[in-house]
Amino acid sequence: MKIRWRSGPISLKQLVLIAVLLLALIAVLVFKDPNVKQISFMQQSKIQEVSFSSHWSEFQNKINLTGAAKIKDFKLIYDKEGLIYKVEFDLIDNKEYYMYKHCFSCTNEVENKVSLIRNTQHEQVPYADQYITGDLFFNKLDFLKTKPELLDQQKFAYYLIQSSGRNEGISYKGDYFELIENDFRKLAPLDPPEESYKGFNIQIVGNEHPTSFGTGENNTKSVIIR
């Protein structure tokens, strides 16, 4: 069947039809794109009950990651009851770059769906060697979540666990801790910006809302991972 448009200006109905066809085409391309997947890293639960290492191992198998896969820009938000609100992170695995997002309690229904996007690079992702492996990161996160001095859930309504994943110098205000193997201790305060601590690092930041987290002396705790 051929569709013929009459000559002259396009009518409103024709514009609507064109828009609908374009949206349908975009939807088909997105949902058939092999680089867009809905594979969950974890289900919603309380942070104290989560085995991050187990979830990571299962996730590796689901999307065929190597043991050298690196973590970048990790963010996890949980409330004062410990219930996980949102988790997102990027992954670097040789020439593959992944972006994962999953919000469990967002008001926007689109955000409450799992989003895993894969991009294949022509060459290895730059500076990949400067990032922490997922194996090491989630192993340390499992250890740190058992420390009450870090996960004090009574002061704020929401908490953000964040990490760039990079071996770098940091000078956030607030308390500092050091984790070497299973040796966990508090460090001396910094006088930023003149002073800094260097290493892989994780911050726990408190806030009254699940968005717009800001670091400060009274709401931020940083852990240096050696």
Image (cartoon, rainbow, N blue to C red):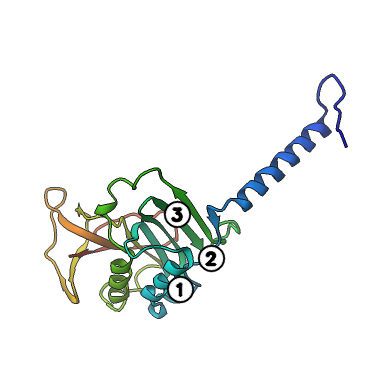
Secondary structure beneath disc 2? loop
Q: Is residue 69 left or right of residue 175?
A: right
Q: 10 Å neighbourhood of mark 1: few (<14), some, or many (≥20)?
A: some
Viewer-side label of 3, 1? 3
**Residue at which label 1 appears:** 83
Q: Amino acid at mark 1?
A: Leu
Which numbered circle lies on residue 28? Answer: none
Residue 75's place in the image compared with 45, above or below, is: above
Q: Quadrant of the N terminus?
A: top right
Q: Residue at x 34, y 70 (%)?
A: 155
Q: Does label 2 or label 1 sit earlier along the sequence?
A: 1
Which numbered circle lies on residue 105? Answer: 2
Q: Residue at x 39, y 57 (%)?
A: 91
Which numbered circle lies on residue 99? Answer: 3
Q: Amino acid at mark 3?
A: Met
Q: Residue at x 81, y 25 (%)?
A: 10
